[in-house]
Amino acid sequence: MRGLTGKVAVVTGAAGGIGAATARRLAAEGAHVVAVDTDEDRVRQVVESLETEGTWVRADVSAEDGVAGYVTAAVDRFGRIDLHHLNAGIPGSFATLPELTVDEFDRVLAVNVRGVFLGVRAAFRQYAAQGGPGNVVITGSIGSLRGSADLLAYQTSKHAVLGILRGAAMYGGPLGIRVNAVAPGIVPTDLFAATPDVSGGKDDMSRRASSTPLRRAGTGDDVAGVVAFLLSDDAAYMTGEVVSVDGGASIVSTVRP
Ligand code: NAD
């Protein structure tokens, strides 16, 4: 992919399935990765596996000082930031609407929405300080586009990041800053395994994946390839876009005419 070699890329949630795959793919394309996560051991292991020189930062993306800390660490190490993949996220509990507590609602939005807001804001401030263009990709979800009865906080958060996406793309366009999102479907990571819908284990996951047009679950690499593309110069004329990476799941109608 064009334009990734030598770039400095921050990836949040980089210890997890999709973030680790993105870190590895960006490094394979020649970028230097700053891998951010709350899970210090796993994020360190991810960085040790990269093809290019990278670094890791233990930080909570929902906290202003956490985000400021990883930006400072990236700039101290590599002098600049070119690419941001805002990917850290949590599923939250799967309480039905009457049972969902305010604390749980706020907990999910703090990471999945405030974390993305803080990350996008930090990216824009850093790009302005560098006087140059920049690039952001947000990890949304099929839950950004579809509803489900037991995922209210998560789906609210994933819908909300599309608001951040579109506002940031409008503001950033004239500054040479592109902002796009990916919307993964079924990707068997720790996050997905935490959902009660898949508590039936592999069989249930296979059943759900087999009802998608491509008849399989996705992988971290499936998502990472699209993230890398959006961060590359091959996507130079794309901004404000939400790209589904779901094996076609989002085009399936559950209502037959
Ligand atoms: P994952 O659980 O494997 O990875 C998520 C990572 O984020 C973990 O390493 C975790 O430690 C980190 N994290 C959580 N809270 C954090 C915080 N406050 N600060 C810093 N790091 C934090 O899950 P994943 O599937 O790789 O999820 C990555 C993204 O993809 C999430 O935004 C998720 O909502 C989205 N997504 C996943 C799926 C799927 O099926 N797996 C589908 C759609 C969207």
Image: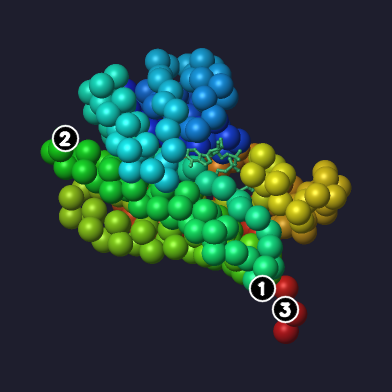
Determine whether the residue tagged by mark 1 lies in a helix, strand or loop: helix
Question: Looking at numbered disc 3 in the image, what kind of residue is underneath it?
Answer: Val
- Tell which circle, 2 or 3, labels the residue nearer the N-terminal end: 2
Q: Is residue 22 visible?
A: no
Q: Which circle marks residue 130 in the picture?
A: 2
Question: Looking at numbered disc 2 in the image, what kind of residue is underneath it?
Answer: Gln
Rendered image coloring scheme: rainbow
Residue 127 place in picture, x, y as percent: 21, 40
Within the image, what quadrant is residue 208 found in? bottom right
Of circles 2 and 1, which is in front?
1
Q: Which circle marks residue 44 in the picture?
A: none
**Where is ligand 1, by quadrant?**
top right
- Tell which circle, 1 or 3, labels the residue nearer the N-terminal end: 1
Of circles 2 and 3, which is in front?
2
Residue 199 place in picture, x, y as percent: 80, 49
The residue sitting at 53% across, 54% down in the picture is 108
The residue sitting at 37% across, 57% down in the picture is 165
* In this view, 48 is above or below 130: above
The residue sitting at 38% across, 64% down in the picture is 163
Determine whether the residue tagged by mark 2 lies in a helix, strand or loop: helix
Residue indicated by mark 1: 98
Left or right of 45? Residue 71 is left
Q: In terms of depth relative to the viewer, which is nearer, 107 or 73?
A: 107
Left or right of 170? Residue 200 is right
- Tell which circle, 2 or 1, labels the residue nearer the N-terminal end: 1
Q: CA distance from mark 1 to mark 3?
A: 26 Å
Residue 63 place in picture, x, y as percent: 38, 43
Residue indicated by mark 3: 255
Q: Is residue 237 visible?
A: yes
